[in-house]
Structure formats: structure tokens, C-alpha cells
Amino acid sequence: MRKNLIAGNWKMNATHLETIQMVQKLSYRLDYADYQRVDVVVCPPFTALRSAQTVIESDHLQIRLGAQNVYWEDKGAYTGEIAPGMLAKLSVSYVIVGHSERRQLFGETDADVNRKVKAVLGAGMTPILCVGETEEERESGVTEAKVGGQVHAGLEGLTGEQIAGLVVAYEPIWAIGTGRTASDDDAGAMAAFVRATIADIADEASESTRILYGGSMNPGNVAGLMAKRDIDGGLVGGASLDPDTFASVIRYWV
Ligand code: 13P
């Protein structure tokens, strides 16, 4: 059985001081039963990871920590980059890899994304591999070709066991930050397509891989999305910045 996972991608928001407050406020709104149903992850900016780690450890919170990006080398002359081992030392459990903003704004290629996925796994963390099509791609009927290609490239060279433990986030780019969500049926169909694509690569692993939906997920649309067989959680941007709202997304069945 796949455990649900809901991750807040805070993007370039929150100082380390704001992060401490946000993590604490979120924790006040969640209880033991919530963590039994959902793995709760927050992904603050790099500069706030140490502060978040400190709150989580000192208050014994069950919130897990994620990073938004990583470089694939262990160390060296890569000014401005962050190595996987640096994140692992901060008790980071998940790393978002290949977010569409990184692909579109910072030129990350499928090959870069695959190197990052491997580096994250090599450091004992779980990649959240992001895939998704643009509006033009959807309109011209190449959604499956685009997303299938990103899944194949991202998983290149991984073992079945690694694929089973992976998280893949399907995030249609036209739904990110726009308030436009994919319909439950479209999102569910694309999650099923992602799982079928994974099954082509590693048949047995595909039932274990967790697939998230991302793109304007909020307290009003989360339950319908989560009802889809192949959607195991969400990658939440804007709605994760307010602890009350994010807690309502996490407690989607209430
Ligand atoms: P929004 O929830 O703000 O649309 O962002 C989605 C996203 O990009 C999460 O990674």
C-alpha cells in the first residue's frame, strides 16, 4: 500500500525566522492521526533548512524536511551550488528535482534531472521528480509524449528498488500558480499514465512509486484529486504558505 504524501513547496518564500513560525504553526494544527494517514513534508528555501531542522528535532515533530533543488556533484568548485551530502546532514529526507520552474527558468535538461535523481538517491534521500506539459503541448496533443519522455529520462539507469521508493509529481505547467487546476479526471488519467510509463520500465516497482499531483491544489479541490486511484498526494505551492490553509489540504478528508 502506498502512503499518501503531501509536500509544501515554498519556492523562494520565507526567511529562516518565518520558517520557524510556519513549521510550528503547521505542527499545532496536525495530530498523530494525520501523520498516520499522510507523510507531511515542507520544502523551505536552502537558507531556512537548518532552522527548520532544529525546530523539528527539538519539538520531536513528525513533519519531514525537503529541499527544492540540489547539484549532483559531492563537492568542488561549483560556486553557488549545494551538494546532496550537505542536505542529508541537515536531516533532509526529500529533494524536489526537475521542477518546471527550474527546467524553464534555469535551463535544466532531462539529463541534468537524471543526474540529480541519482545523486539524491546516492545520498540516501528520496527524489520528488517533477514532470508536466505546457499549455501549448496540451493543446497540440503531445502531453503524453512530453510527460512520458520526462519520466523515461528521469528514471534512466535506476534499479527497480530505487524506482519503487521514488516520488513522481505530475504538475501541468499551465496549472501552476494560476488558480487553474486540472480536472480530477484529467489529473487522475495523467497519474495513471505516469504509473503505466513507470511499469514499462520496472513493472513490479510501479505499484509502489508514489505519484503526486501539483498545480493550484487547495483545500477546495484536494479531496476530489485524492480520490483518484493513482494520485497518492500533492505538491502544493501557494496554498502551503499559510499554515491554516496547508493543514486543511493535508487533512483533506475532514
Ligand atoms: P501552486 O500550488 O502555487 O500552483 O504551485 C504548484 C507547484 O509548482 C508545486 O511545486
Image (cartoon, helix red, strand yellow):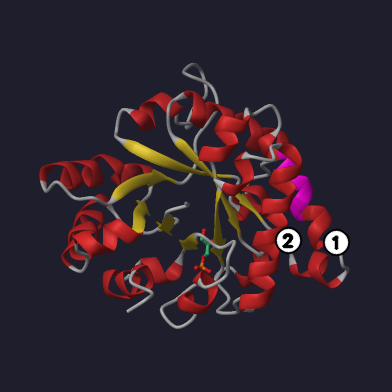
**Who's the residue at 45% across and 28% down the image?**
84
**Who's the residue at 49% across and 35% down the image?**
70
Q: Give the residues in magenta.
A: 147-153
Among the two numbered marks 2 and 1 on one chain, the one whose residue lies closer to the N terminus: 2
Disc 2/disc 1 C-alpha distance (Å): 8 Å
> Looking at the figure, which quarter contains the C terminus?
bottom left
Q: How many marks?
A: 2
The image quarter containing residue 89 is top left
Three-letter residue code for mark 1: Val
Give residue 19's position: percent from left, percent from top. 26, 55
Name the side, left or right, on which 77 lies relative to 66. right
Name the side, left or right, on which 74 lies relative to 149. left
Work out which residue is located at the far bottom of the displayed protein and give it: 220
Residue 142 is marked as: 1
Give residue 103's position: percent from left, percent from top. 66, 48
The image quarter containing residue 203 is top right
Q: Which residue is mark 2?
A: 133
Work out which residue is located at the far top of the displayed protein and give it: 76
Is the stretch drawn in magenta largely helix, strand or loop? helix
Give residue 106's position: percent from left, percent from top. 63, 46
Vertical comparison of 107 with 79: above or below:
below
**Who's the residue at 54% across and 73% down the image?**
225
Name the side, left or right, on which 239 lies relative to 231. left
Cβ–Cβ under 8 Å for marks 2 and 1: yes
Q: In front: 111, or 225?
A: 225
Vertical comparison of 198 with 226: above or below:
above
Q: Is residue 168 magenta?
A: no
Residue 24 is marked as: none
**Who's the residue at 49% across and 80% down the image?**
221
Three-letter residue code for mark 2: Glu
Q: Secondary structure at mark 2?
A: loop
